[in-house]
Amino acid sequence: MQAQAISYSDAQDRTGAPWRLLMLALISSIMVLAQVLMAQARPESLAPLAEKVSPAVVNITTTTVIEGRSGPQGIVPEGSPFEDFFREFQDRNGSNGGNDRPRRSSALGSGFVISEDGYIVTNNHVIESADEIEIEFFPGDGQPAQPLPAKVVGTDPNTDIALLKVDAPMPLKFVTFGDSDTARVGDWVIAMGNPLGQGFSLSAGIVSARNRELSGSYDDYIQTDAAINRGNSGGPLFNMDGSVVGVNTAILSPNGGSIGIGFSMASNVVSKVVKQLKEFGETRRGWLGVRIQDVTSDVAEAMGMDKAKGALVTDVPEGPAQEAGMLAGDVILSFDGNDVEDTRSLVRTVGNTEVGKTVRVIVYREGKTETLKVTLGRREDAERKAGPAGGDDTPQEQTEKQLLGLSVGVLNDQLRGELNVPEGTNGLVILSVDETSEAWEKGLRAGDVITEAGQQKLSGISDLEARIDEAKEAGRKSLLLLVRRNGEPRFVALNLAE
């Protein structure tokens, strides 16, 4: 008897109705189970959570005294041909009252209480330049019924966080920070605050994305589709356990209203900042003392690295790294036991490290790794101190040559003066760039100064030619250049086929 393949339709024909009934029952059971699981994933109501956390959410009203101004400032640019017209229009309608008396301007925002003794977190931009700050609490048992004045404990513009303090007549209800690193894309969250001045409000959504970066060095935003509008700034983003996983800070919108793209600064960043503001009244971030850029694939190839990773050091001014022996051209692979993926991860890790701590830094240098011990300084102190590093001044007779899509000449005293290049800087100045070349595509322009090639200093055109020959002999496809523009250094890898 030959074996015969049995299809689903064959089985139906042979077993009849009982088989179909069994399948329908199985499908029905699966659908019921799926509905149960979905119900478990999303609570039937958010009311219990809202009741639990809302007493700790506050409205913030700020008042700023603005000096009186005459004329149509803010309507047309100063010097505009329409300036006289709008001044006449304002005077006719009495828009400035006919005097220049100071006036008061008010603004609204949100915040949340983090301790029973009255510490409150909000955004720096909510209270910045405010002359008076008033806190209004959510109506509830045990919370002040009347608004209370608040004072600023400390602010951090880098993360847009501010810490306030009120003196309350009773212990306040408060919320705690959760671990934002555990928040997953798809997790439910709720935002609370005072949107558009309408009073306490709640909106729900999910975590749409993680680790968003907007503009700052320390940015780590949670993106959410929970409605966030003007007035929500500084309010908390809660997870389903009632822990704060973010501080609502910004939205992406073409019209100023919520379109489902909001950003909350991650709680693991905020909690560290708040701790320092509470203890010192200011932030105290670690400082390594280097200028860095990301390692691209062509830069990695030019340096003989197997993959693009780490942070490439472009300059080492006076500071902790220089004292530890770090050099421009080093690639930082590890910092204090943490792998460095790119410049952003290094900046955040260094900033979160204790000032004065001695850490191990592993760098890639000339084909091998080295370990340096660096004692960190304080970034806030270092930001007031900066200066270009110089080398030996070796005058050279000016010459010009076409190399790698560039026309280069030796940097002499005359060119230093014309380009405002610091005294003591040696290298080659780019006189022109072929607009069809890779150099042009990578942003090199006339006036840029090449100080190193192949991680060796340049004093003449022959040095650059030698570096090109050496790279070709080593089988490399590109050459790494250290280029400075207005004192700012960066590495650029150019294809040797140019």
Image: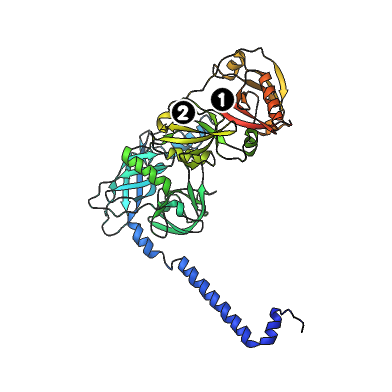
Q: Position of residue 433 (x, y in %)?
A: 69, 26
As helix, strand or loop, the secondary structure at mark 1 comes to loop
Q: Dot 2 lies on which element? A: loop
Query: Residue farthest to the left?
Result: 169
Q: Position of residue 306 (x, y in %)?
A: 62, 40
Which colour style is shown? rainbow
Q: Residue at x 34, y 60 (%)?
A: 52
Q: Residue at x 27, y 55 (%)?
A: 143
In the image, 143 versus 158, the foreground residue is 158
Pick the residue in front: 112 or 209: 209
Q: Can the viewer see residue 36 in this picture? A: yes
Q: Quadrant of residue 406?
A: top right
In the picture, the disc for residue 486 is 1
Q: Looking at numbered disc 1 in the image, what kind of residue is underneath it?
A: Asn
In the rendered image, which quarter contains the C terminus? Answer: top right
Query: Disc 2 versus disc 1: distance between alpha carbons?
Result: 27 Å
Residue drawn at x 56%, y 25% is 486
Residue 324: assigned label: 2
Residue 431 visible in the displayed image: no
Is 474 left or right of 354, judged from the image as shown?
A: right
**Image quarter of residue 67:** top left
Q: Estimate how packed mark 1 is, as few (under 14), some (14 to 19) or many (20 or more) residues with alpha carbons within 10 Å.
A: few
Q: Residue at x 25, y 49 (%)?
A: 168
In the rendering, at what x and y percent does residue 367 appear?
A: 60, 33
